[in-house]
Amino acid sequence: MATPAARLPASAALQRRGAGGGLARALGPDYRLGYLFVAPIVVLVLALVAYPFGYAIYLSLTRKYVGVPPVWVGFDNYVKLTWDGFFQRAVVNSFVFTFGSVAVKLALGMAMALVLTARIRFRSFWTGVLLIPWVAPTVVSALNFLWIYDYSLGVLNYLLVKVLRVLPQGVGWLSEPGTAMASVIAVNVWRGFPFFGISFLAGMKAIPAEMYEAAAVDGATALQRFRHVTLPALQNIIIIVVLLSTIWTFNDFTIIYILTKGGPGGATQVLPVLTYEIAFGAQRLGEAIAVALYMLPAMAVVIIVLARHMRRGRAR
Amino acid sequence: MSPRVLGRAQGPVAYAILTALLLVVVFPFYWMFVSSLKSEEQMRTLTAMFWPSPAVLDNYRQLLGKTDFGAWYGNSIVVALSSTFVATAIGTLGAYALARLKFFGRAFMASATLITYLVPPSILFIPLYAQIRNLGLADSLTGLIAAYPSFTVPFVTWLLMGYFESIPEELEEAAMIDGATRFGAFRRIILPLATPGVLAAALFAFTQAWNEFLYALVFITNVKLRTLPVGLSTFITGDVYGWGFLMAGAVLTTLPVIAAYTYLQKYMVEGLTAGSVKG
């Protein structure tokens, strides 16, 4: 620690970092420690994400069964899928599931954030309680709802038929095509809306109180304050949270796998579950990966736009 | 706090909405807990629907005594703790470098890390499985411990980059003027200040690993080596066990996460809002 630099003026001591010779000039003053610290991440990302990702693209262009070497078939898998009715239905279902879930999560998350910025008692305690679905294991929540939705013994039918008497008889929430999709969306919403809420809450807390006071002095109604003060200030957070959730929901495997496995009759079949079933049920790996990658161009656009917003959000 | 959007009408309206949200959030957990304490008999006859009468521990006893639940619990703890440790160590160092140090390629690596965090497991699980199998790690906890950093490390890194960026750079500069090396400044000045952030990141990594389902479902075939989420999910297909039994497993699986979260809620909320989303 006690180097002569301690006695040097500030500027000289800081310049010392830049005095690493030609390499430091080319690679930046902190290149040694920098590369040392990021090396594990680089290795990890290459081995666990980049390589498998590249291999996935290659496999999707082959006919590959478990235990047999892949055979190159070009875009055959993709072309076949394009005209496959079951796949088309899974694509539509994936979009319905994603947009339905995200829209409701947005609304509920906003309600949660507004309530938690209002003058209520024990605010931080309620915030914590409302966040629990988001930290609880997804499998547990899905199993819990499987039990709640149960036709003969489930509490939902009991509540609606015996307690509230709004239905003459129970509904097979997950076994009837008319209600299955809404039922799985409800579970995804239940699990995901707290993330929207807590993110919006953080954004709202950063809005200066004077802006609301000024709006109130100008005679703005609650709705006008929301539209002209809250929403514009939250714009970036809303974009980030909606896009993040879109990616997560589009790729949500657990909830649908546990609740319906894509049933009844494919009514809730979505791409991640279809991928799993083709891969480990039918053992057709090439085709399975093509299912997973089919929407990649669209997803890549979302990911890049999102990454940009997230980096901009950080840079301020 | 100022009267925000809801204004003068906020009291009753806010409490009404809050109550509705709390009911929706809390009731499933209450139901899970109550169900786990009901006897098979009570479950079948629909008596005293909303509370156990009498409350029995049969389900828990059966779960711990007659199934591999205990072994799965151990597996989950091993896998979650190991991958948390790996992710936190690698992520903390990497995040510091990406947030603070000046070297060629930094911006590109920061973007790459973020994009990696956003690549969904549903795309990666098949090729990753192939790779784990090629390494001879299929059907082993080591395979899961090796695979989980694919999502925990990018997340921890991204979260902590935000945290390090929020610590004033002058603190390190002052230390370095006093003769500290870059590494010394990091270890003595920055790391202690970042402890709440690191703790939050570690907790999130633990939660993610503890809750993970898809990789564990695909990579593990040996019944004894299952993790809790996968083990629990196999109870539904068995048809041997009742719902109360399944809910007892659900309660015990949720417990560690909720306990950690309750204890460290402040850090988690802070870390989440400071790190993952900042507008």
Image (tube, rainbow, N blue to C red):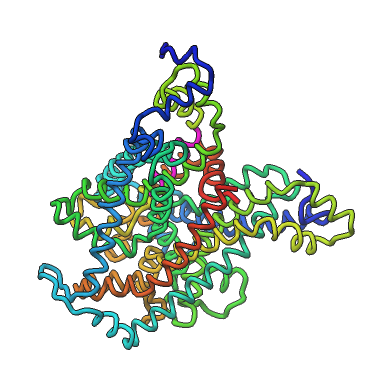
Picture quadrant of residue A65:
bottom left
Residue B65 visible? The answer is no
Q: Judge whether residue B199 is colored magenta.
A: yes
Query: Front-most of A14 and B6?
Result: A14
Q: Which of the image's four quarters has the N terminus of chain B?
A: top right
Query: Front-most of A42 and A144?
Result: A42
Residue A226 in percent (x, y) is at 75, 60
A245 sits to left or right of A235: left
State whether the magenta stretch is mostly helix, strand or loop: helix
The residue depicted at 45 percent of the width and 68 percent of the height is: A301
Residue A191 in percent (x, y) is at 50, 59
Residue A260 in percent (x, y) is at 38, 72
The region drawn magenta spans B196-208
Up/down of B61 relative to A233, above or below = above
| Residue sticking out furthest to the front | A22
The residue depicted at 60 percent of the width and 64 percent of the height is: A106
Question: How many discs mark residues in the rendered view?
Answer: 0
B55 sits to left or right of A115: left
Query: Front-most of B196 and B191?
Result: B191
Q: Judge whether residue B136 is colored magenta.
A: no
Up/down of A72 relative to A138, above or below = below
Picture quadrant of residue A72:
bottom left
Picture quadrant of residue B187:
top left
Query: Front-most of B265 and B111?
Result: B111
The residue depicted at 62 percent of the width and 76 percent of the height is: A166
Residue A177 in percent (x, y) is at 44, 82
A31 sits to left or right of A161: left
Up/down of A120 relative to A29, above or below = below
Residue B196 visible? The answer is yes
